[in-house]
Image (cartoon, rainbow, N blue to C red):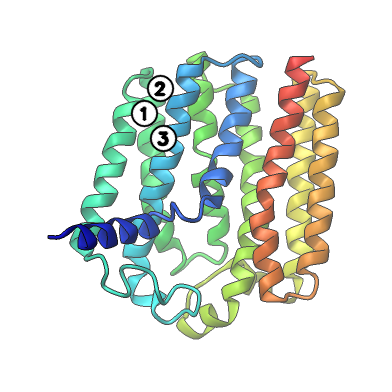
Amino acid sequence: MNLQTIIKKLDAYERLMRLDKPIGILLLLWPTLWALLIAGNGKPDWIVVMIFFTGAVLMRSAGCVMNDIADSQYDGLVERTRHRPLVSNEVSRKEAYFLAAGLSLVAFGLVCTLNNLTIKLSVLAVLLAASYPFTKRFFAIPQAYLGIAFAAGIPMAFAAILGDVPPVAWLLMLANVFWAIAYDTEYAMVDRDDDLKIGIKSSAITFGRFDVVTVMICYALTLLILTICGIWLMMGYAYYIGLMIAAAVAIYHYYLIRTREKSNCFSAFLHNNWFGFAVFAGLSLDYLF
């Protein structure tokens, strides 16, 4: 195998893991960082933070590989996904299985440096990530299941720092589920026509003409639950300013998706990075001052 072939193979692996599209890592990371900040009272152990940061990159990458393995028979029929490495045979299914297993094992090895409760929760997180792709076959709103999978880092973060999962962690998790329904419905609105043709279920299909309204309701519920968390934790003004900025981001998304133009819906999905960052920034500044 010559150098050029190796470079092409590594590029295919990178695209299979979506490392060229880091938005998924960020959407997975922001809620985990919220939880780490709260659990650590603004000063989480940086070793724990780095373990979770690295774990988020590894598990999101593994999740993308698992998703493409499960969806390989459909991806070739969808305009946006027809050039993915498994569909174009740049990567074999055997290679994909080994890659997903390797990434998951490295992530699990990192978690094994933490306490027993965190390790137990990590097993559940892996099961959620592995089973999510199959929910699109039968579950009307697979985005809700994705939200649970993406929120699995929240109770793990509290467990790693406190050795326990307090009620506020479950509230944060619920907020993240509604946020995931909002941003992944925007994403699903891009693929709605193709998904209808091949029989894949999504929230964009289930909500139908109420898709935009439902997205905005989910943003509102996310912000409401985060406000309740702030009151519970007796947060200060900086936190609520962060929530107000996040609300402004959500309103901007309404103007992007209201016409249901595919490019704008995809832009709104990508822009959710700023929603997560706004909440994180408010939390950080509140603990700082």
Q: Within 10 angstroms of label 2, few (less than 14), some, or many (20 or more) residues? A: some
The residue furthest bottom is 197
Question: Which numbered disc covers residue 55?
Answer: 3
Which residue appears at 34% of the width and 35% of the height? Answer: 107
Q: How far from the left and from the top, in percent, is residue 77?
A: 42, 82
Alpha-carbon span between mark 2 and mark 1: 5 Å
Nearer the camera: disc 1 or disc 3: 3
Say which residue appears at 69% left-offset and 54% top-offset.
Answer: 271
Q: With 253 as the anchor, is 73 left or right in this view?
A: left
The three-letter amino acid code for the residue at tag 2 is: Leu
Q: Amino acid at mark 1?
A: Lys
Q: Quadrant of residue 87?
A: bottom left
* Residue placed under numbered mark 2 in the picture: 117
Q: Work out which quarter of the rendered image holds the N terminus and state it.
A: bottom left
Q: Percent x, y for residue 232?
A: 76, 22
Neighbour tally class for label 1: few under 14, some 14-19, many 20 plus, Cα within 10 Å: some
Query: Seen from this angle, which residue lies furthest front?
Result: 3
**Label 3 SS:** helix
Say whether marks 1 and 3 touch (CB < 8 Å): no
Position of residue 216 measured from the top left corner of the image (x, y, whole percent): 78, 57
- Nearest the viewer among 272 and 21 is 21
Is residue 204 shown above or below 112?
below
Of the pair 60 and 131, the residue shown nearer to us: 60
Tell me whether the residue at label 2 lies in contact with that at label 1, contact meaning CB atoms closer than 8 angstroms.
yes
Say what amino acid the circle numbered 3 marks.
Gly
Return the residue nearer the eye: 56 or 216: 56
| Mark 3 or mark 2, whichever is nearer to me | 3
Q: State the CA–CA distance, disc 1 to disc 3.
A: 15 Å
Which residue was labeled with disc 1?
Answer: 120
For marks 1 and 3, the one nearer the N-term is 3
Q: Quadrant of the C terminus?
A: top right
280 sits to left or right of 220: left
